[in-house]
Image (cartoon, grey):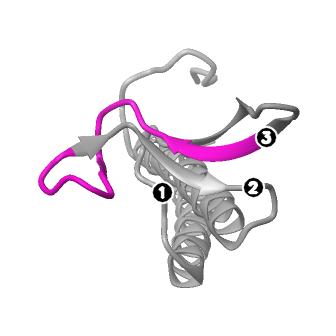
Amino acid sequence: MSKREQQPEISQRAERIEKAINYLTQKIEEIEKEGLLAEPGVKVARYIAKGTKNRYWYYQLTAEKAIFPKAKKENEFSRYQHLGVAGSEAHINAVLSVVRRKQIEELTKAIDELKESWSDLYSNEKKVGNRAD
């Protein structure tokens, strides 16, 4: 196939890639409007507290660095934020904020991969996996 014959095909593929990027970007915007996003590296963890007779399960947000303000000490931060029991409003909101962040991270990765694919269309260098004519 000559270069002239390839140009319409390349532009069609580029257009499909651009449409996919726009679609994923819109999805990110929709997710961001749904509510708060957890900081990167933050996750929900379950822990057990032992009472005098029973054990109780509680939930907390955990972070790699101390980012949560301490309740009783100004200008001090903790790696943990207590959420309460399963199904509490704080627990559910935290789970959803982590899920939203993970969704956005994955969508962003997909956009980055599509951008790389788009640049491959117009690159003259031969890459592994592409057929050389």
Is 61 placed left or right of 56 in the picture?
left
Nearer to us in this view, 27 or 79: 79
Can you give x and y, in whole percent of width and height, for residue 60 in the image? Answer: 59, 45
Q: Which mark is residue 85?
A: 2
Q: Label 2, label 1: how many angstroms apart (C-alpha)?
A: 19 Å
Q: Which residues are magenta?
A: 57-76
Q: Nearer the viewer, residue 128 or 30?
A: 30
Query: Would you name the residue on which mark 3 appears?
Result: 57
x and y percentages locating residue 42 in the rendered image: 48, 43
Residue 94 higher or lower than 67, as above or below = below
Q: Amino acid at mark 1?
A: Ala
**Could you tell me how far apart the alpha carbons at marks 2 and 3 are, in whole angstroms?**
7 Å
Say if mark 2 contacts mark 1, CB within 8 Å: no
Q: Measuring 67% from the left and 57% from the top, which residue is drawn there?
A: 95
User: Which quarter of the picture shows residue 78?
Assistant: top left
48 vs 115, nearest the viewer: 48
Measured Cα–Cα span from mark 3 to mark 1? 22 Å
The secondary structure making up most of the magenta span is loop
Q: In terms of image quadrants, where is residue 20?
A: bottom right
Asked whether the viewer can see residue 2, the reply is no
Which of disc 1 and disc 2 is earlier in sequence?
1
Q: Residue furthest left?
A: 75
Q: Residues within 10 Å of mark 2 (few under 14, many from 20)?
A: some
Q: Given the image, on which type of amino acid does mark 3 rest?
A: Trp
Q: Earlier in the sequence, mark 3 or mark 1?
A: 1
The residue beneath circle 1 is 38
